[in-house]
Image (cartoon, rainbow, N blue to C red):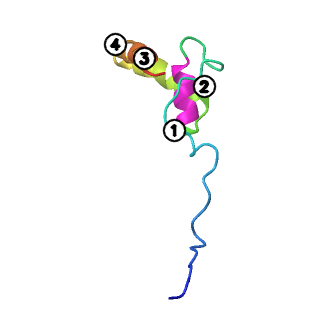
């Protein structure tokens, strides 16, 4: 039998962001618990955008996102 190996040129090696194992709190960049910084790091967004989204969501949702934020901060890591 022959040892033929076909390589797909469209397959790219994983970069450092996609090699991570999941969501982690980022307590070095975080202000309160590191939730917003962890979400920004996980999705590759600017942390300011995530923080603004939390504030707007909290105001629109009558404070319900505060409970979600606390739950994420206590459960993750």
| Image position, residue 54 (x, y; %) | 47, 21
Residue 77 is left or right of residue 27, and the answer is left
Of residue 2 and residue 6, the one placed in the foreground of this image is 2
Q: Within 10 Å of the Cα at label 2, are there few (<14), some (14-19), or many (20+) other Cα atoms?
A: few
Which residue carries the number 4 mark? 62
Of residue 57 and residue 67, the one placed in the foreground of this image is 67
Closer to viewer: mark 3 or mark 1: 1
Q: Is 18 rendered above or below residue 33? A: below
Q: Within 10 Å of the Cα at label 3, are there few (<14), some (14-19), or many (20+) other Cα atoms?
A: some
Say whether disc 3 or disc 1 marks the residue closer to the N-terminus: 1
Closer to viewer: mark 1 or mark 2: 1
Between marks 2 and 4, how big is the CA–CA gap?
A: 21 Å
The answer to whether mark 3 and mark 2 are in CB contact below 8 A is no
The answer to whether mark 4 and mark 1 are in CB contact below 8 A is no
Closer to viewer: mark 4 or mark 1: 1
In the rendered image, residue 39 lying in the magenta stretch gets the answer: yes
Rendered image quadrant of residue 30:
top right
Between marks 3 and 1, how big is the CA–CA gap?
A: 21 Å
SS state under label 4:
loop
Which residue carries the number 3 mark? 69
Q: Is 10 rendered above or below residue 50? A: below
Q: Is residue 23 visible?
A: yes
Say whether disc 4 or disc 1 marks the residue closer to the N-terminus: 1
Between marks 3 and 2, how big is the CA–CA gap?
A: 16 Å
């Amino acid at each position: 039998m022959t040892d033929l190996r076909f390589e797909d040129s469209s397959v790219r090696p994983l970069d450092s962001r996609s090699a991570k194992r999941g969501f982690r709190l980022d307590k070095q960049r975080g202000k309160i618990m590191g939730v917003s910084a962890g979400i920004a790091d996980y999705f590759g967004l600017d942390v300011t955008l995530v923080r603004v989204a939390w504030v707007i969501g909290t105001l629109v949702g009558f404070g319900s996102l505060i409970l979600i934020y606390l739950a994420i901060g206590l459960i993750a890591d």
